[in-house]
Image: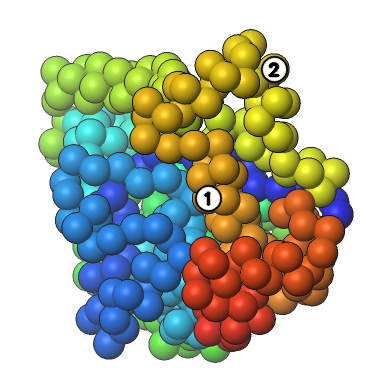
Amino acid sequence: MPASTSISPDLRLKIPATYGLSLLNLMQERGHEAEAVLAGSQLTLAVLQDTRAQIEAWQYAMLLGRANSLEGDRGLAYELGLRSQVTKHGFVGFGLISCSTLRDAIAFSERYFQARVPAFRSSLSVEGAEVVVTLHETIPLGPHRAFIMDLVAVELCSLFAKIMDMDPAKQGWLSTICVPHAEPPAYARYRDRIPPFRFGQPAVQIRFPARMLDEPIATADPVSVQLAIERLEQEMARQAQDHTTSSQVLTRLVCRDQRYPDIGDMAEMLHVSERTLKRRLQAEGTSYQVLLDQVRQRDAMRLLGNPALAVAEVAEAVGYTDPANFARAFARWTGLSPRDWRQRHGPK
């Protein structure tokens, strides 16, 4: 199997649980049960409602995929992007509204907002009288790629309109979104509410007049910007210095050549004995097999979301040479066979 079928370590980054709660609230408004939206994510409503909690980026990606599958309509991406509030982003949002100009806010977001949304990195250029912010995909987005692109682009435009105290409903949108995919049916319903899209373009871009770059932000506060920077740097440092044995194991549990590292391999990577590794994991209330099963389950569900992959290929990609053994393990994890899980939770 190609290397792209392995989950990226970047997806283990932590993001605020409020991201998942916003999505869940919208889905419940649309008549979906919380249990159906949270399926396969290993998340609970209580976790998402904890304002101090963080979830892993892969879990949010799975929630987005589930929501897209349940709705079967990309209008959800537009709606979720429009509803994004600055406060949802915690100190990132606090810092953005405290910047002096839009130029400063974009620079701020390049460092801190992208740490929260690892699927993209951005680059800024000026083409004549127009600013071009290009979003570069950093990890494979799978079958929900177009959905995620639409969501991120609309959310960024919506956030920066709020930061600049602009009301697109009255003033119109000054930004334009370019995407590589074709126009979905839902676009017609949202055409008057979201920035104009250009479909079939070579890259994901947000374009707006260059004159806006140096327009002041009414809520600018240099002291608050510095406070936000200090808190966000501390947060990023904590993530980088997460030295629990479990986190180090999870970071290294990547399937290559249809094989995950065994406990001997992992002990060697961590420069400890197998006995020491087992003891440390036990002290953290887990075991190597539990962590391996978690990663296999997560990777299997992500891969099953790709209809181009046969179940046997998914089994092989997560280290099972015998599809029957994979099916038994998957049933133990989820209570469903891989085919039943794909039918219920995969792309529609």
Bin the neighbour count of mark 1 within 10 Å (Cα to Cα): few under 14, some 14-19, many 20 and up: some
Bin the neighbour count of mark 2 within 10 Å (Cα to Cα): few under 14, some 14-19, many 20 and up: few
332 over 42 or under it: above or below: below
The residue carrying mark 1 is 294
Please provide percent x and percent y for residue 155. Answer: 38, 58
Please state which of residues 271 and 346 is positioned toward the viewer in this rendering.
271
Please provide percent x and percent y for residue 147. Answer: 53, 68
The residue drawn where x is 69% and y is 17% is 268
For badge 1, the amino acid type reads Gln
The residue drawn where x is 72% and y is 35% is 261
Q: Quadrant of the C terminus?
A: bottom right
The residue drawn where x is 46% and y is 28% is 281
Single out the residue that lies furthest toward the top: 271
Please provide percent x and percent y for residue 340. Answer: 60, 83
The circle on residue 43 is none
For badge 2, the amino acid type reads Glu
Local SS, label 2: helix
* Residue 207 appears in the picture as rendered: no
Q: CA distance from mark 2 to mark 1?
A: 21 Å
The residue carrying mark 2 is 268
Please state which of residues 168 and 32 is positioned toward the viewer in this rendering.
32
Which quarter of the picture shows residue 308? bottom right
Single out the residue that lies furthest toward the front: 275
Q: Quadrant of the N terminus?
A: bottom right
Please provide percent x and percent y for residue 227. Answer: 18, 20
Marks 2 & 1, CB-CB < 8 Å contact: no
233 over 328 or under it: above or below: above
Which quarter of the picture shows residue 97? top left
Local SS, label 1: helix
